[in-house]
Image: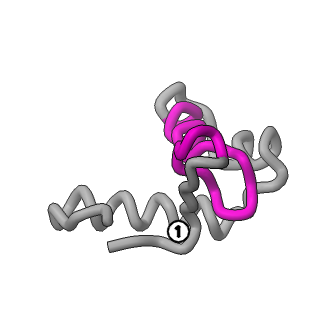
Amino acid sequence: MTTSAIYSSPEILSGMPVFRGTRVPIKNLFDYLESGDTIENFLKDFPTVKRDQVIEVLEWAERVLTTGASIA
């Protein structure tokens, strides 16, 4: 199970998963949400990330976590 919103390459941030087309780590989104911040603030602080990418990542994470599907 994969999503087109996430990209990983050894040449970008040592392979850390990022939002496709950016150098913004996916982890940043979860850090924002964990601290109680909003998606709107995340998008304001990282303007290269699109709202539809954030939604796709969150929906993907939900599917993986609720179905036990592999992330590969």
Of 7 and 46, which appears nearest the observer?
Answer: 7
Q: On screen, 41 above or below 64?
A: above
Q: Residue, x 52% and y 39% (percent of image)? A: 27
- Region rendered in magenta: 12-33
Q: Which residue is mark 1?
A: 56
Q: Residue, x 52% and y 68% (percent of image)? A: 56
Residue 13 highlighted magenta (yes or no): yes
Q: Secondary structure at mark 1?
A: helix
Residue farthest along the top direction in this orientation: 35
Q: Is residue 48 toward the left or the right of residue 28 in the image?
A: right
Query: Where is the N terminus found, in terms of image quarters?
Result: bottom left
Q: Quadrant of residue 72?
A: bottom left
Amino acid type at circle 1 is: Glu
Q: Position of residue 17 (x, y in %)?
A: 53, 50
Q: Position of residue 23 (x, y in %)?
A: 72, 47
Of 10 and 18, which appears nearest the observer?
Answer: 10
Residue 25 highlighted magenta (yes or no): yes
Q: Residues within 10 Å of mark 1 (few under 14, many from 20)?
A: some
